[in-house]
Image (spheres, rainbow, N blue to C red):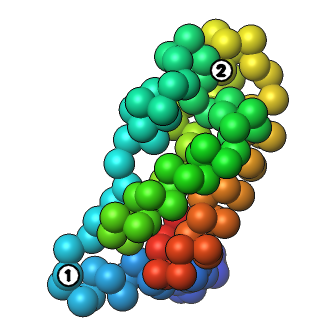
Amino acid sequence: RNTSDSMPPPETPGGLAFREILASKKPVVFDGAMGTTLYEQGVLHTRAFEECNLTAPAKVKAVHAAFIANGANVIETNTFSANRLLLHRYGLSNIAEIAREGVKLAQEAAAEGGKGTIV
């Protein structure tokens, strides 16, 4: 007998918080477009926006903070194109490092926002 059939998956803090938001019947507000916002702040599309996790972490974190300040309940990491195929176009091969840093920056921004924002 497969025990995974009888046991629910472990609940993550974010998953539990998201269920609470859904149960409240209040609107769920997600963040905006990270790449577009970074572009508006001068990061050219000739670079991978995800590279900013390493080269401009304060800028990435500030974008997250702005989304949170404007009411986002949920923010996504700056890892939209963090895969081998897309980052290779920019000469990048440190995908795991870029992804880890993207997660870390979003988690820090959520914690510092003090509003229970989910990453």
Residue at the image position 80 percent from the left and 40 percent from the top? 97
Q: Which mark is residue 87?
A: 2
Q: Earlier in the sequence, mark 2 or mark 1?
A: 1
Q: Is residue 93 left or right of residue 58?
A: right
Q: Is residue 55 above or below residue 76?
A: above
Q: Is residue 34 above or below residue 103?
A: above
Q: Amino acid at mark 1?
A: Lys
Q: Is residue 64 visible?
A: yes
Graded by Cα atoms within 10 Å as few (under 14), some (14 to 19) or many (20 or more), the crowding at tag 1 reads few
Q: Is residue 70 above or below residue 95?
A: below
Q: Is residue 61 above or below residue 56?
A: below
Residue 54 picture quarter: top right
Residue at the image position 49 percent from the left and 81 percent from the top? 116
Q: Position of residue 85 (x, y in %)?
A: 62, 18
Q: Secondary structure at mark 2?
A: helix
Q: Which residue is mark 1?
A: 26
Q: Position of residue 83 (x, y in %)?
A: 63, 29
Q: Position of residue 34 (x, y in %)?
A: 45, 41
Residue 66 picture quarter: bottom left
Q: Is residue 33 left or right of residue 105?
A: left
Q: Amino acid at mark 2?
A: Leu
Q: Is residue 57 left or right of residue 119?
A: right
Residue at the image position 60 percent from the left and 58 percent from the top? 106
Q: Position of residue 35 (x, y in %)?
A: 46, 33
